[in-house]
Image (spheres, rainbow, N blue to C red):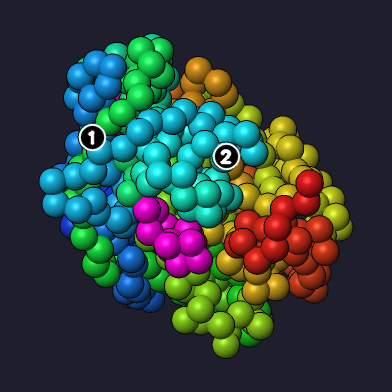
């Protein structure tokens, strides 16, 4: 049996629906991936883990001075609720949160540019902002073609810095509020926190010659709100399913583990849960191959390597062997490869980025109707992954040293908020 991009693409189409963390749809997709892995002849099961979740019952924002207008908003999941009846607050646009801005945020509803990053959240909480406002999309979006993002205050924010009232709105509305000189607004937010259940789908094919050495494959299968997540990242999920089919039919020398991670979009929670639950066996893992985003027709192939410069050279040579143009570099990548590198397991992330204007991520445009994915392009990453897997598995002595370069360790620590990023 050979790998088949056509079969992978058919499975991609079957699973092209929203699969948000801890939802019934995420569980449905997990069950489908489990059945597919089992039908290929692999030992497979589901491992559940707990995820901090939130539900917003009601969110409202009304500018009250110098004009009166209500705007569509969504409350951040796991945000603090306002008192019953809401709060009336002065408004301030803090742009990029420079020191001059921070002098003016105390006790106010504060609008900032871009996404709410952890460092910005810390600044706002310490400066005493009464509510945090963000915006998504662009000022030229058509309301009928876009959604008001639903976002979440992750525990990496709330645990060290406390909960805050936080709302998200459309970019065009944020611009109007600033342009019309809003000075006061009324805000209401009613929300609850709870623990949800997500799933990792786990399969194994035992090695025939060196079963004590484990090669791990990973891809996340969850999506964000409003998105079918075919690009990010069911494309990676169907690719590692093809690899599983291949090695089930062609037994590997080394043991291979295949994991489809849930709740990656919530902060790599699936892979963090898996590495924590399997920490005792990670000493046997010699490489983690992760695939996150593929199949873009117009784009480029990139392979961040979370290991050493020698590993970069090795992977780069393998890509040249099969004639695939790929930027291989020593770097981290915001995906499920990070928890493995954090535990000392070298990792390679294969991805095909859609280029500007032909790559859509984390919104409703990540779907087949956007017409920016195709089977031939999915096959590029599939062939890269197969060749890399075949060569490392077939090596007499494992060709990638189990070592993480100091600069990668530093980047992982910064990513996981253990240390401040370098200026």
Q: Which picture quadrant has residue 262?
A: bottom left
**Viewer-side residue, 280 vs 73:** 73
The circle drawn on residue 400 is none
Q: Is residue 155 magenta?
A: yes
Q: Position of residue 362 (x, y in %)?
A: 40, 37
Which label's residue is closer to the chain start, 1 or 2?
2
> To which residue does mark 2 refer?
103
**In x, y percent, where is residue 198?**
31, 66
Look at 29% across and 61% down and name the residue there.
53
Front residue of this view, candidates 313 and 120: 120
Above or below — where is 116 with respect to 249? above
Q: Is residue 393 visible?
A: no
- Label 2 SS: loop
**Secondary structure, magenta segment, majority class:** loop
The span shown in magenta is: 146-164
View extreme (bottom): residue = 280
Q: Horizontally, is 185 left or right of 283 in the view? A: left
Residue in the foreground of this view, choosing between 309 and 82:
82
Q: Residue at x 47, y 50 (%)?
A: 128
Residue 186's mark?
1
The residue lying at 72 percent from left, 33 percent from top is 325
The reply, left or right, for residue 25 in relation to residue 329 is left
Name above or below for residue 191 compared with residue 141.
Answer: below
Alpha carbon separation for disc pair 1 and 2: 22 Å
């Amino acid at each position: 049996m050979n790998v088949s991009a056509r079969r992978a693409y058919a499975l991609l189409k079957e699973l092209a629906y929203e699969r948000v963390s801890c939802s019934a749809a995420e569980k449905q997709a997990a069950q489908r991936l489990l059945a597919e892995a089992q039908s290929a002849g692999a030992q497979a099961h589901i491992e559940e883990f707990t995820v901090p979740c939130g539900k917003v019952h009601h969110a409202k924002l009304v500018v009250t001075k110098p004009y009166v207008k209500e705007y569509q908003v969504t409350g951040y999941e796991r945000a603090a609720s306002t008192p019953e009846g809401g709060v009336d607050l002065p408004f301030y646009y803090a742009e990029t949160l420079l020191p001059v801005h921070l002098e003016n945020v105390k006790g106010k509803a504060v609008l900032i540019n871009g996404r709410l990053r952890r460092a910005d959240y810390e600044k706002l909480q310490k400066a005493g902002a009464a509510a945090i406002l963000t915006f998504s999309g662009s000022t030229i979006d058509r309301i009928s073609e876009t959604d008001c993002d639903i976002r979440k205050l992750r525990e990496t924010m709330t645990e060290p810095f406390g909960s805050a009232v936080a709302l998200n709105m459309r970019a065009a509305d944020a611009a109007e509020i600033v342009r019309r000189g809003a000075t006061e607004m009324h805000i209401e937010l009613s929300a609850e926190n709870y623990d949800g259940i997500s799933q990792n789908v786990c399969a194994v094919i035992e090695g025939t010659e060196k079963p004590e050495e484990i090669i791990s494959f990973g891809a996340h299968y969850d999506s964000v709100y409003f998105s079918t997540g075919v690009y990010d990242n069911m494309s990676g999920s169907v690719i590692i399913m093809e690899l599983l089919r291949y090695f089930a039919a062609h037994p590997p020398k080394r043991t291979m583990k295949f994991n489809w991670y849930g709740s990656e979009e919530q902060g790599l929670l699936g892979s963090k849960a898996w590495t924590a639950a399997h920490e005792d066996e990670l000493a046997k893992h010699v490489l983690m191959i992760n695939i996150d985003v593929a199949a873009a027709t117009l784009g480029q192939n990139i392979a961040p390597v979370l290991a050493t410069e020698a590993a970069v050279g090795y992977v780069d040579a393998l890509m040249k062997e099969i004639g695939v143009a790929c930027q291989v570099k020593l770097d981290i990548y915001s995906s499920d490869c990070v928890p493995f590198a954090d535990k000392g397991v070298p990792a390679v992330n294969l991805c095909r980025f859609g280029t500007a204007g032909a790559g859509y991520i984390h919104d409703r445009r990540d779907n087949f109707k956007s017409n920016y994915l195709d089977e031939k392009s999915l096959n590029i990453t599939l062939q890269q992954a197969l060749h890399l897997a075949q060569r490392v598995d077939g090596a007499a002595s494992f060709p990638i040293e189990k070592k993480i370069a100091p600069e990668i360790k530093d980047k992982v620590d910064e990513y996981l908020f253990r240390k401040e990023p370098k200026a």
